[in-house]
Amino acid sequence: MKVEYNRQGAARKELVQAISAITGERAKYLFLPTKAYRIGSIMVWKNGAMECEDGELFQKVVKELEARGFKPEETAAEQAATEETPEQEPVKETAEPDANPEPELSQETAELEEGTEPETAQEPEETPEKVDTLTISFPDDFTEEDFEKLQNLVASKAGLFKKALGTDDLTIIRSEGKINFPWFHEADGAKVQAYSRLVKALCQFAKNAKRVTAKEHEVPNEKYAFRCFLLRLGFIGKEYKDCRKILLEKLSGSAAFRNGGKKDAVSQ
């Protein structure tokens, strides 16, 4: 079964990340001639079309993608009524890439980042501005319960995380014994340290917490709310002063006053 999303470049990368998060499968780039991504039994083609021979999985992924804001050009039912037989184009297109083992994208090349593909596989229209994407990874020693707590923890502060980090995607990807956080888009030394400490603290907090709910609350003072959250994570004292400043700099409000104050600055 096949559905058209008509997403290319950075938009296709977002689609691939979402499918990877839904299925729990690692995405692999297949290089020439198809320039497609394979996520388990799912293919995402160069033009952004998604294809899967497993009807049940196909319907599930389409439904989950729609819930995440990915609208297909045709509904799954309409596409199923008009698509060609499975023996035709899909098999023909996947035969060539399978003839040679395709390398997996490493953390160093920013996983799923099309802008870092080898020169022989580059597409001018798919070398977007997100070449600075940073994925931070830690060993996956989480139980299912701990991983659920981690997801709930992030969901409970999703609005603050997105604004503080300058991202719209808080997907957490589990693959090959690692937990990956492809959230970050700036990579200077101070920011990398702050982001790494944040991810490490989130992981430790989720493991130690007895229960974490995913409910997000409205906050009138972003800096104060997120500063309190960072303190709960252990960002206490002069050692974390620079990290707190980096993580709070994009938020509004006052870090020093609960209900806001004259100063709109990070507390020292």
Image: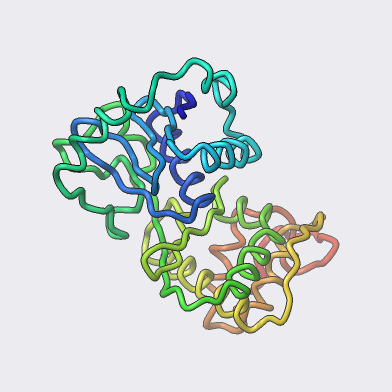
The residue at the point 62 percent across, 78 percent down is 205
Please tell me which residue lies in front, 172 or 184: 172
The residue at the point 80 percent across, 67 percent down is 257
Please tell me which residue lies in front, 151 or 156: 151
Q: Position of residue 7 (x, y in %)?
A: 44, 28
Q: Quadrant of residue 241?
A: bottom right
Q: Position of residue 90 (x, y in %)?
A: 32, 29
Q: How is the image coloured?
A: rainbow
155 to the left or right of 260:
left
154 to the left or right of 200:
right
Q: Quadrant of residue 189?
A: bottom left
User: Is residue 247 placed above or below 102 in the rendered structure?
Assistant: below
User: Is residue 188 placed above or below 147 in the rendered structure?
Assistant: above
Q: Position of residue 160 (x, y in %)?
A: 67, 56
The outermost residue toward the top is 82
248 to the left or right of 256:
left
Q: Quadrant of the C terminus?
A: bottom right
User: Is residue 143 placed above or below 61 in the rendered structure?
Assistant: below
The residue at the point 20 percent across, 48 percent down is 102
Please tell me which residue lies in front, 97 or 149: 97
Please tell me which residue lies in front, 12 or 227: 12
Q: Give the number of callouts.
A: 0
The residue at the point 54 percent across, 63 percent down is 246
The outermost residue toward the right is 259
